[in-house]
Image (tube, rainbow, N blue to C red):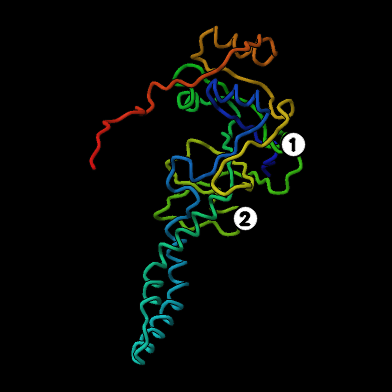
Amino acid sequence: MDDFSKTKIWRYMDLGRFASLLTSRSLYFACPTDLQDPYEGLLPRSYTEAMSTMLQPMVDDFLSLRAQLVSLGRDTQRLGDSLATLPQRMAAVQKVATSKFGVSCWHANEHESDAMWKLYSASGQGIAIESSVEQLRASIGDRKDLVIDRVRYADFDRDEIEKGHKHLSLFMKRKCFEHEKEVRATVLLPAQGKGILVPCNLDVLVTSLHVSPLVEKYVKDVIEALCSGNTQALNKPVRQSILYCAPDYQIDIKTD
């Protein structure tokens, strides 16, 4: 039987995210609605069809009630509007439910992945943390809301939903993402829709660090210096470039 806790996992990232991890000593849990996949938090078509079948008798009852009210000369505009917007409101409920959670995404593999290096180190500055499910859980500590599970991949147009799966919508993705072999950690967000940094013990989390096979030696030296603490403090102001900010002036004329 597969011992999920022993599963080896990897977190691929660029140098900036790695520096953030070291300085914050925290893992970032993003809101799924901020990720690129528009299907985040959704379930296959079969689930939607089953929900439609379940809801239809109730809708039919409301339609019958509306017809009776119309025959009595009652105003049914609000009831009609409510029925017309039911599908959109149901979709909104699902999106709200998804936005209450934060996710940290990992890649399950016994070995490094060429595909993941190419995805996350296009600039040749990629870093990968090697860890395990057990270490990830232990590094975050005693959080009752922490859930770690494999992501299931399905054909959303044809497959039936998995029966008895405790963690459903946040742990299902389309088959086109199957190469990710994702293991996902989730927590409840204090503020809906806003990702959070979750403190973690990096000494417990990290088995070893791997730098991209495309990395230049100076980048590896920088990473080693960051990890050893051998970096000199530079007490100078840090400013973000305004090169691409919109201009703060416009044509000024009086029109009255």
In the foreground, 116 or 110: 116
Query: Residue 242: where, in percent of width, then height?
Result: 42, 22
Give whichever of 59, 8 is nearer the camera.
Answer: 59
SS type, badge 2: loop
| Vertical side of 11 occupied by 87: above or below | below
Q: Is residue 197 above or below residue 151?
A: above
The one of 100 and 108 positioned closer to us in this rendering: 100
Question: Where is residue 244, by image quadrant?
Answer: top left
Question: Answer yes or no: do the residues labelled 1 and 2 have beta carbons within 8 Å?
Answer: no
| Residue at which label 1 appears | 138
Residue that lies at the very extreme toward the right in this rendered image: 142
Around disc 2, counting alpha carbons within 10 Å, would you say few (fewer than 14), some (14 to 19), or many (20 or more)? few
- Amino acid type at image mark 1: Ala
User: Quarter of the image containing the N terminus?
Assistant: top right
Q: Position of residue 145 (x, y in %)?
A: 69, 48
**Residue 107 appears left or right of 199:** left
> What residue do we see at 54% from left, 43% from top?
31
Give the residue pinned by disc 2: 166
Q: Indicate the amino acid at tag 2.
A: Lys
Please provide percent x and percent y for residue 7. Answer: 65, 36
Q: Which residue is at a point 47% across and 67% down the rendered structure image?
A: 51
Between the residue at mark 1 and the residue at mark 2, the CA separation in whole angstroms equals 22 Å
Mark 1 residue element? helix
Instruction: Between residue 234 and residue 255, name the one nearer to us.
Output: 255
Q: Residue at x 55, y 27 (%)?
A: 12
Q: Position of residue 219 (x, y in %)?
A: 55, 11
Given this view, does label 1 or label 2 mark the residue nearer the observer? 1
> How crowded is the residue under tag 1: few (<14 C-alpha within 10 Å), some, or many (20+)?
some
